[in-house]
Amino acid sequence: MSSLFPALAQGPGERVALRFGERSLTYARLAAAAGALAERVRGADRVAVWATPELETAVGAVGVLLAGLPLVPLNPKSGEKELGHILADSRPEIVLAAPGAELPADLRNLTRIDVDVHASGTLPEETAEDGDPALVVYTSGTTGPPKGAVLPRRAVASTLDALADAWQWTDADVLVHGLPLFHVHGLVLGVLGPLRRGGGVRHLGRFDTGGVARELASGATMLFGVPTMYHRIAETLPGDPELAKALAGARLLVSGSAALPVHDHERIAAATGRRVIERYGMTETLMNTSVRADGEARAGTVGVPLPGVTLRLVEEDGSEITAYDGESVGEIQVRGPNLFTEYLNRPDATAAAFTEDGFFRTGDMAVREPDGYVRIVGRKATDLIKSGGYKIGAGEIENALLEHPGVREAAVTGEPDPDLGERIVAWVVPADPQAPPALEELAEHVARRLAPHKRPRVLHHLDALPRNDMGKIMKRALTP
């Protein structure tokens, strides 16, 4: 049993722990406010938080974890059906919210506690065990109702400590980001991470490149973002020397939640001299791999397994792929202290998610480079295309398409083909809608960069790609 936040009890009390816009809390004030909240929620089974990007959400999360209770972060943009399912499944007794926040009708049957960031209480003695649940985070639910992944306290601690090792993350670091707080990226890595280290977090409330430049120029050392955010940065850099200067001075730029296109990697590196590093994780596993701060930030890869994580690639029959050849595609399976313990109320889904020897089946497809770096090529369900006897990952084709000057955004899927089994379909947002690139031009472009069998056979032009809150392309919504 160990504390998730040792800095609250022994860290420098006057150092700023949290800042959201103009509002901030020192470690001493955070300890007082979170301690007071922990006392108010004590005795509950589960506590939900209306996870708006505000100081109250962060204080609420810390208070619930100090009390040793499981926290259920609620997405304020959830539709009525999804929210109803999450509440019925997790059955929280209490909902935390910022004072004055208007909550949906479904939440009015719960005991509401408004988080008081000015309250004064004492830090409780932490009695929760490492295996006790810390969070119940709901998956995106692309194949049915969202499932509640139960993340134990050891998963949170082990992931954050492994990232501290990989990224040389210390109490001297100040993180800036504008990520939502209902997801593990924004909440666990982006808020609990700095607090576990004893450093600071500056949340932008809403992402904008001006805020990034301002915070990095005034003491922030790290930036977390998703590919859509880094794409906006890459688009803004040519006309914004202050942004380029601020990024050049950052210690670490990290992208996650989806693959960062190689084209954006290169544009940012050319303008700033800094390379974005990528990491790979999931709701159920927290973080599995990362490019290390002292390693090579190689575009298109997510680095090596983190300390404590065992990672393997397997064929469809379950046999392990041992070749590190950059070509052999297999499903990623992982084992380690970073894993969730169960899908809440879903023993069937939990059992199906794990192999007999305890590895979690991620459903992500990847190859291993000769030096062990992992390169993800897509999701097994939507991104693995079997064409002409080849197993092809959609991700590498998407990156190739994005290198074409006529392509602004790109997604790749497969569709049935009587000859090939599946044919490759490209969905492209043109850089110039008045002069969209033709199929033949893009097919030749891909064939030159990758291989002829990886060229698209069908092309659809779109005004925009459908994306979720984390910037991931929703491929199931791509229909002719």
Image (cartoon, rainbow, N blue to C red):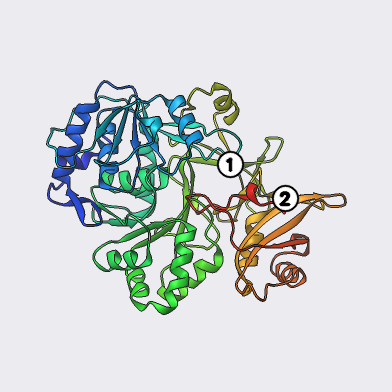
Q: How many marks?
A: 2
Q: Residue furthest front?
A: 105
Upstream in the sequence, badge 1 or badge 2? 1
At horizontal 47% and vertical 53% (from top left) the residue drawn is 256
Query: Is 418 located above or below residue 63 in the figure?
Result: below
The residue lying toward the viewer, choosing from 247 and 477, is 477
Q: Name the residue that disc number 2 marks.
A: 385
Q: Quadrant of residue 95?
A: top left
> Residue 51 at what x, y percent from top left?
35, 42
> Residue 323 at what x, y percent from top left?
65, 49
- How far apart are the two marked residues, 1 and 2, measured between alpha carbons? 21 Å
Task: Tell me the number on the disc at residue 77.
Answer: none
At horizontal 71% and vertical 35% (from top left) the residue drawn is 317
Q: Amino acid at mark 2?
A: Ile
> Residue 30 at what x, y percent from top left?
18, 42
Q: Name the residue that disc number 1 marks.
A: 312
The residue lying toward the viewer, choosing from 381 and 131, is 381
The residue lying toward the viewer, choosing from 451 and 82, is 82
Task: Say whether residue 310 is visible.
Answer: yes
Name the secondary structure under disc 2: strand
At horizontal 59% and vertical 55% (from top left) the residue drawn is 369
At horizontal 25% and vertical 39% (from top left) the residue drawn is 5
